[in-house]
Amino acid sequence: MKNKFFNVIISIIIISILATLASTGYILYEDYQKGRVEAQTRFEKLVAKCEEAIMVYKQPTRLFLLVPQNELKMYPYSYHTLSIDYFGQNVLTYPSVQNTRFKGFYTTYSDSIVESNNINLTITAQLYTLPSSIIYLRIRVTFIIILSITFLCALLLIATCLDSSDKKSKAVVKKDEYKAENNEIKEDDELVLTEDEDYTEESYEESDETEVQETQEEKPAYEPVNLNTEPVEKPDVSYGETVTSQINTPLGAAPAAEEKISTPAEVLKSTPEDHDQMFSTATGFCFEKHLVSRLESELARAASSQIDISLVLVKIPGLVLDSPCGIEICKKILDIFHYRDMLFEYKTDGIAIIFSNANIDKAMESCESIYAEICSILSRNNSSTKPYIGIASRSLRFISGERIITEAEQALIHAGEDQDSPIIAFRVNPEKYRKYMATKE
């Protein structure tokens, strides 16, 4: 019986391992097929973006190269290699140094963009269809499942062995008890009843009285509890104070005298109203009136954390933000920055961006990609206008929100006047700034 049980356990382990391996192979095959479709779609989108950019810039300039570079930044684990040739001359190669380490299975795609004799662009890319990270994830899950099954079967075998040993020991004990009982029966047969001469009626009465007296002198097992005890004193909380919440207090209204605890239903009821007051329904960005207050809070947080923060002002002359082109630009900027509460409407044709944990150089690098994306969208919508961008940063200063907005607006004015440099940052001279603040004081 025991051997049959062991055979059943071993069969279960083998079947479970084979089933797990088969399912893992099938899942990897499905991942490979899905990866091929996604790789082809991603390559076609890259070719479309490059075609739009080359039609705008006519040559593979630095702004054109930002399009494939942004694609590589957004999907760094999708591309094995990427090469762009212009009239047979290589203008972009990724990666710059080939890595022979295995990173997964990939497929090669190639396409050309040709327009008469002016443009001849060849794009060749190797995209992963089954990256090594997915292979590692599937194999790790398979290993955990097989290990768990083996561990459970081992515990079951141990429990079975212990149970069989307990049964054997109990059988031995019962056998010994049976022998002992037979010996006691034999000894009882030889017993002879004798009369105790020392045991009398008086001694019986004395022992009876002693037992009754000891029973009366026994103490109860518990102490009686006084239910009329004095109440326990409350802890002293005079060292604190109540705080009145003014988050939902309307502008110009006086705060309440006492704090009102809102129920969950009231909180859920007030949230959509606050959301509507904060964000524009047309663009999805915050209204411009909230820019200064939010910028002040972010500057205070940056000062306490000793990090930098930048303000980016984007102006697109003649553009209406709630137009189809403006909505497309707002959606693209939201896809780049992700944080809706850091994006604001600015004037009637501009956008303000609070770029946290970023100095001037990092902000300018990001603005180059924003500029390229906006130009691409304007070109698709047959608009001849060009955007310009102004940047200002905290630069480790204790500065107000209005001051950094003024600096960014000055940079924006210079960017609008200089057609060759559509992106201009306001870089602070620490010595001059200290002198300026000293004169103001």
Image: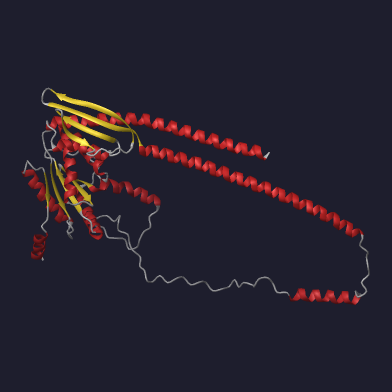
Question: Residue at coordinates 28% horizontally, 35% vertically from top-left?
Answer: 80
Residue 301 in view here: yes
Percent x, y for residue 304?
25, 60
Question: Residue at coordinates 39% horizontally, 49% vertically from top-left?
Answer: 265
Q: Is residue 86 above or below residue 313?
A: above
Foreground of the two, 402 or 255? 402
Foreground of the two, 75 or 366? 75
The C terminus is located in which quarter?
bottom left
Question: Residue at coordinates 20% horizontally, 35% vertically from top-left?
Answer: 93
Foreground of the two, 165 or 123? 165
Percent x, y for residue 152?
56, 44
The N terminus is located in which quarter?
top right
Question: Residue at coordinates 12% horizontally, 22% vertically from top-left?
Answer: 116
Residue 381 in view here: no
| Side of 287 where 260 appears, left or right | right
Percent x, y for residue 14?
54, 35
Colour scheme of the picture: secondary structure
Q: Is residue 32 above or below residue 259?
A: above
| Side of 92 where 258 appears, left or right | right
Percent x, y for residue 122?
19, 28
